[in-house]
Amino acid sequence: MTWCNNFVTNLDKRGYLMDRVKRIAATVIAGVFAIAVVMTTIEVYAAGMGTEQEVSGAAVLLNDYCTRIANGELLAKDPLLLMQGDDLRSSMEPDEEIVTGPATEIESAIRDGEHIRLNLNYSRLGIADVSQYLNVRKEPSKKGRIIGKMVKNSGCHIYNVKKGWAKIVSGKVSGYVKAEYLVMDEEAEALAAEVGRDCVEIMTDSLNVRALPSVTAPIYSVCDTGEEFEIMNENVDEAFLQKIIKKEDISDEAIERAGGMDYLLEHMNEFICIMVDDDYAFVSKEYVREQFSLKRATKFKYDPETGESEGTYGIVSYAMQFLGNPYVWGGESLTSGCDCSGFTMLIWRHFGRSLPHSSSAQAGCTTSVSDPRPGDLFFYGSGGVSHVAMYIGGGQVIHASNHRDGIKISNAYYRHPLKIGRP
């Protein structure tokens, strides 16, 4: 603990810490870091303190550190306690306190006799207990502006509960939700083991997702850093690979382009099979992080005050009613289930525009645009169009993704779009 006290004291001398925060920081740091990480941290910060560069922020941002862990930007072992940028404390009431003490990493949940590590490290865990979605608001009031959406079984960190409203952070969304719609504490930890998923998070910009486990295989899609996809098989074997080849109707030419079957069998253990919307694909283990994950809140960026026409905002408002509803292949019901093209077809039908029930056919009957506006359609696929989503503004789309996620909101460029079309 000598290094920890010296570390905090040195920062305090520079005017960044108060004694109370120093004691909290020392306790938390001691509980989080292993000895190996400690030695690395000393060297990193010793080097940093030898410069004249000012550190942004006036304190050790324990709540911001928790936020970074909660949205997956940090792991508990990362030696990064000083965060640059704004502090969540600025939005807290004078009488609010940060939950401190040893963080429960939700590793107490057991599955298959092994510990589960969630991508969420919380002092107090909450899980959305709703049939569709839970609004996250800027202020603790029903009149507060909606800034995010938590679908069923999304996880969050609870800072406090006051007058029926919980102050939470989930993913990159920080705000207030009605506390009555959250499962909390021990009950939430038990539920997390049931509703969490094995996922990979993309750790590099523009990662090529392949149709087969080979760096020369056809590119299925290009996915951005931070995107998260469910793992279907992290230990690919020959039987599973043959099943994928048959299901996805992968040609002999594509197999040869990937190096041939012998090459695929030799290198398949270097890849993980994931689900991208409703298709199987492969990513290199080198560029992803595996984690047991709860769904996170999604920022709701669209604002009708930005100048969009009333009619345009109407289509977004209408589509958002069905967030969290189920995905059903071939389905044509916005409430009981639809697939991706069924969703966009039904939304536009409500506004008097007829579209076919096929993503590729919709791509063929829409006009290409380079300046998307709410209501436009984003088309994705490998070689040809196989998925469609509707733009809602703010760089986001809403779409019927797959059986696990249902109708959800995503970054519009979570995959590289083949076309942006206007009905």
Image (cartoon, rainbow, N blue to C red):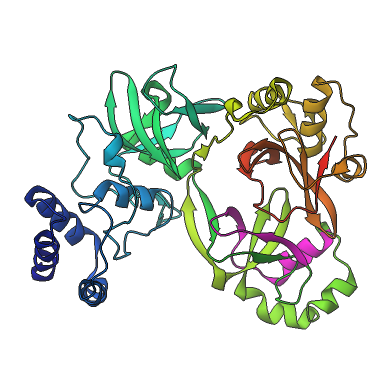
Q: Nearer the viewer, residue 9 or 290?
A: 9
Magenta stretch contains residue 244: yes
What's the residue at 45%, 44% (across, down)? 172
Left/right of residue 72 with respect to residue 4 in the rendered view: right
Give the tally of numbered discs: 0
Residue found at x 25% / y 72%: 48
- Image coordinates of residue 28 in percent, x first then y, are 19, 55
Residue 202, above or below 294: below
Residue nearer the viewer, 263 or 415? 415
Which segment did they paint magenta?
219-246
Which quadrant would the N terminus be assigned to in this image?
A: bottom left
Q: Quadrant of the C terminus?
A: top right
Left/right placement of residue 10 relative to residue 216 reads: left
Q: Residue at x 28, y 43 (%)?
A: 123
> Foreground residue, 66 or 336?
66
Residue 252 counted in the magenta span: no
Quadrant assignment, res 249: bottom right
- In the rendered image of this protein, does residue 190 appear above or below residue 320? below
Percent from the top left, x then y, of residue 59? 20, 52
> Residue 12 appears at what percent x and percent y?
11, 59
Front residue (pair 372, 413): 372
